[in-house]
Amino acid sequence: MTTASVSLTWPLAAWPNSNADRRKHWTRQRREARAIRQAARIEAARLRDVIAPAVVQLHGPVAVTLRFAFPDARHRDLDNYSAKALIDGLVDSGILADDDHRHIASVTRTLDPIKTLRGHLRVTVEIEELA
């Protein structure tokens, strides 16, 4: 079994949130998602090329765990924080073959107890190849 982990720190206000995004213009939403996707692609490519060059691509099925770290102890609904652009960036980098149901068996969201910088969100994606 192969595992990979990618971490991304981002301004909290610019992370896609289904409740807050109802008030954003669609072009701003698209621009923010595109930036997250590109940053995830770059970070995953760095992971693949520098840390684990043997891991060319995880063909799946894989289990994806998303660990969200926030700057404070406020109560938040993790389901509101979208990870679609982040997972698409992992596919763009070549770490994942695709993001459909044949390649990603499960997606789990958890809260990371270690706080992040003020005004920022940290998402750590752990990908575990299933047998």
Image (cartoon, grey):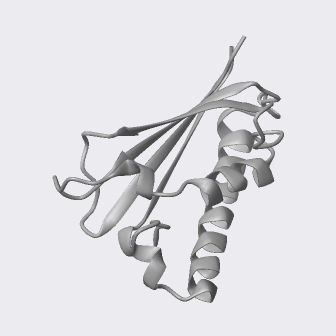
**Residue visible at 24% across and 50% down?**
115
For the view shown, which residue lies furthest in the left direction? Answer: 73
Residue 113 in percent (x, y) is at 25, 39
Q: Residue 37: give x, y in percent of width and height.
A: 66, 63
Asked if residue 19 lies left or right of residue 33, the reply is left
Residue 111 versus residue 41 in the image, above or below: above
The residue shown at (45%, 57%) is 81
Is 99 left or right of 35, judged from the image as shown? Answer: right
Q: Nearer the viewer, residue 22 or 4?
A: 22
Compared with residue 85, is residue 58 higher up or lower down, i.e. above or below? Answer: above
Furthest residue in direction top, as rendered: 131
> What is the quadrant of the N terminus in the image?
top right
Q: Quadrant of the C terminus?
A: top right
Expressed as whole percent of the image width and height from the top left, the position of residue 59 reads: 82, 29
Among the 4 quarters of the image, the one containing residue 101: top right
Q: Quadrant of residue 122?
A: bottom left
Q: Residue at x 64, y 60 (%)?
A: 85
Instruction: Describe residue 118's horizontal placement relative to residue 104 as left or right.
Output: left
Identified at 70% across, 49% down, the residue is 90
